[in-house]
Image (cartoon, rainbow, N blue to C red):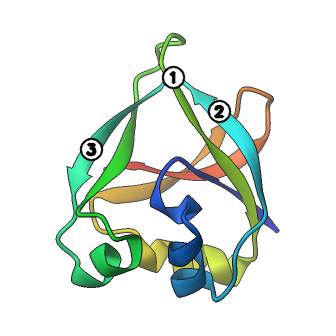
Amino acid sequence: MNKLFSYGTLGYRQVQIDTFGRELDSRPGQLVGYAKSMLEITDPAVVESSGERFHPIISYTGDLADKVDGVIMLITDEELAQADRYEVDDYRRVGADTVDDQKVWVYIAK
């Protein structure tokens, strides 16, 4: 199983059902050293699933004062590949550590 950190639309029930075919269990988490901004999404399928044209996106800053709250979800390898397909080209998946030292995948700005 993989741990995926979501700070945005992958945490939405409808996006999970559209992307994974099920609602995921999640628990709160936090990343340090990342800052959040917003990105306009032009992929019609992603906008339809999320119901939003602007999605959050994070960038690594390395500044310990920068924190991003989100949720940690357990997903299979197949679901991780489905999440990769959901995210538009402005995002890339990287490994990160949460404040409580959990290894997670997270999508950040390219």
The residue mark sitting in front, 1 or 3, is 3
Residue 60 placement (x, y as % from top left): 42, 31
Q: Are marks 1 and 3 in contact (CB under 8 Å)?
A: no
Q: Residues within 10 Å of mark 1 (few under 14, many from 20)?
A: some
What residue sits 52% from the left and 85% below the top?
A: 18
Relative side of 63 to 32, left or right: left
Spatial separation of the CA atoms under disc 1 and disc 3: 17 Å
Task: Find residue 69 and name its label.
Answer: none
Nearer to us in this view, 18 or 78: 18
- Residue located beneath label 1 in the image: 33
Between discs 2 and 3, the one toward the N terminus: 2
Between discs 1 and 3, the one toward the N terminus: 1
Spatial separation of the CA atoms under disc 2 and disc 3: 18 Å
Residue 67 placement (x, y as % from top left): 53, 23
Q: Are marks 2 and 1 in contact (CB under 8 Å)?
A: no
- Residue located beneath label 2 in the image: 30
What's the residue type where badge 3 is placed? Met
Residue 36 placement (x, y as % from top left): 38, 34
Give the position of the N terminus as an image quadrant.
bottom right
Kindly state the secondary structure of the residue where label 2 is placed: strand
The residue mark sitting in front, 2 or 1, is 2
Spatial separation of the CA atoms under disc 2 and disc 1: 10 Å
What's the residue type where badge 1 is placed? Gly
Relative side of 64 to 100, left or right: left
What's the residue type where badge 2 is placed? Gln
Relative side of 28 to 55, left or right: right
- Residue located beneath label 3 in the image: 38
Nearer to us in this view, 4 or 71: 71
Q: Residues within 10 Å of mark 2 (few under 14, many from 20)?
A: many
Question: How many marks are shown on the rendered structure?
Answer: 3
What residue sits 70% from the left and 34% below the top?
A: 98
What residue sits 65% from the left and 33% below the top?
A: 30
